[in-house]
Image: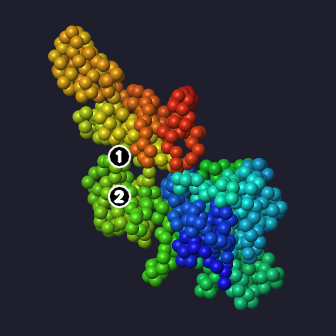
Amino acid sequence: MKEEFKWFLRDEVVNPGLCTYCGACAAVCPNDRIEFLEDGPALTEECPRDGMGACMNVCHRITTDASRMGLTIFGFKAKPPSLIGQYEKMVSARAVDSAIREAGQDGGAVTALLAYCLESGLVDGVVATKGMWKPTPSVITDKAGLLEAAGSRYSVAPILTAVEEAGKTLNKIAVVALPCQVNGLRRMQFFEGLNAHPLEVSEEDGMPVKLPAFVYTIGLYCMQNFSYERLKDFLTAKGVDLGKVKKFTIRQETMRLEMEDGSVEIDLGEFEDAGVVWDGCSVCRDAVSKLADVSAGYTGTPKDWTTLIARNAKGLELIEGAENAGYIETSSEVEVDRIEEFADRKMRKFDRELKKRLSEEKPIKFYWASDYPGVRREAKGTFFVKIRTSSGLVNHDYLAKVAELAGKYGDGSLEFTTRQTIEIQGVNGEKIDDLMAELYEKGLMTIGMGYVVACPGMAYCPEGLVETKQLANELTAEFVQRLTPHKMKIGVAGCPNSCVRVRRHDIGIMGHVRPVLDLETCNGCGRCTETCKPGALSVVAGKAQIDRDTCIECGWCIRSCPHEAMIEEAKGYSLWIGGNDARIPTDGILLKNFCTKEDLFRLINSVAAVFLKYRTKPGRERLGNVIRRVGEGEFLREVFETEEKIRSK
């Protein structure tokens, strides 16, 4: 009997029947310790980390992190989860090339898209599978290879292992994958940002696995997949000679086998009853590859056409480019309700399996909780759900709804966070979907990181100089998705009291006012010197005098002068950048004084652009770290140059 080494994923994912056989774990292992057995991946030798390295971090059955990855995938316009996911456009499509149309599935649209990518130089290669019954992960670099790989397969294959192979010789690739494999691929793609540390390095040469750029991710529809050995044994027992099968397809609840001498149809229920379905498929929720650039499948279109779903701008550009170049033809004839019905059928299967596993007290990871923004696991295994407020303000009706949900789905407790959100605590994993459905139905919103915090400002606080709450809401709407992946926190203070500690934010905004003295009106009474907290005022020769080096521009002297001799010369927002109160705290630096709202939006956009230009460690490098590395002067120079370009557009 083969020795089994201690491995976190084997214990927590593979043995409990959660593994999807996607291959991501092996693709990122720099020491080539993972092999794929009939029942799932296993270690070939002892791992000094007990398998708690990059393989664990990349596994989407531990957590999907779909809500975090979606920010980037969808161009920082991510929406809450839905049955068929968000998209830009749907079309019916098929290949123009008759050879591709004949070899491919449902009109060969996917193969045609890949041919366009290769022949147009958009990618250097394609990762897909070859082989009818036992698919082999393959790296393809020409049209002949694409034709060989065309068509559907229904046995599991660790396709992402080929990504690591592609990285040895290729720089840019397209990947064709099933929904679960797409999720694994995305976790590889965004590894450093998700985990706040780089990939594990080889014990031999100290280098991580070299991964190519994932230029296009094409995701296929999938209801379920099969174990090759179990499928082979099942069909053989049914009298099917696998060597005589020319093609096979699954439509609705039936598998159709095209034989040399006719055809055979088998109800999919028989496969499930015989235990042929891959175990991990039974707890899958995604039928339509929601995290792909383009999703593709037969449902929703006429016979011999493929439904193509452009999920983001990149996917839409790919479809339009392939059509304009003559690789595909398209039609707007798509039945969305059929796609929704297909996806709903998979969710119903998932719900039945979840209830079954819970009743049998089998382990389940609730990996899908992080599909929702603002939902995170707690130390005790339950989850908290972070509810958005209007920069700390809520009305009584809103708060009552949150309290009701906390009692119904959580442990009854709420936490008001330092980032001005409300957390429902102690939610069991099996209640997450119902909670989120009711939460959205009640008009509530959840939010992850990137929330702008603000003090009460001039609308509520007598010391406030500027409006803060509305500004914070506008900044959240504009920047929350774009800045969240970089953990760039924004705080707004209404005056130099800086109750939100603007100098300890990546981006800090503070109201201030510059006082000037009307010498003719001032009688030297000294009232301003008494109210000036920093001690920036004195009376000299019967007149007040301002020490500009000490003045913090809080405006107390203006408000307190009984003769209105201290007047306002300028008022606005000061903008500070590069601070943080994290593990290695730093103070921000002043970027610009007396900004208008319009200035703030331009400057923050400019800061983000320069930050992204120089950032080298996603998830680990805050704005202040980058400023220090680049040099304060150089960083500020580029920010102002970028702002000028934005201003001149």
Q: Is residue 463 above or below residue 301?
A: above
- The residue lying toward the viewer, choosing from 353 and 545, is 545
Q: Is residue 19 visible?
A: yes
Q: Secondary structure at mark 2?
A: strand
Q: Is residue 346 visible?
A: no
Give the numbered dot on residue 423.
Answer: 2
Image quadrant assignment for residue 470 = top left
Residue 334 located left or right of residue 415: right
Residue found at x 73% / y 58%: 166
Q: Amino acid at mark 1?
A: Ser
* Classed neighbour count for the residue bearing mark 1: other residues with Cα under 10 Å, few (<14), some (14–19), many (≥20): many
Query: Which quadrant, please, contains the C terminus?
Result: top right
Element at badge 1?
A: loop
Relative to residue 132, is residue 534 depicted above or below?
above
- Measuring 18% from the left and 24% from the top, which residue is drawn there? 530
Residue 475's place in the image compared with 248, above or below, is above
Q: Residue at x 50, y 66 (%)?
A: 368
Which residue is more in the foreground, 146 or 501? 501
Which percent across, then down, holds residue 13? 55, 72
Where residue 476 sits: x, y (%)? 42, 44
598 horizontally vs 215: left or right: left
Q: Position of residue 376 (x, y in %)?
A: 43, 61
Q: Amino acid at mark 2?
A: Glu
**Mark 1 or 2 closer to N-term?**
1
Corner quadrant of residue 648:
top right
Query: Would you name the residue on which mark 1 appears?
Result: 391
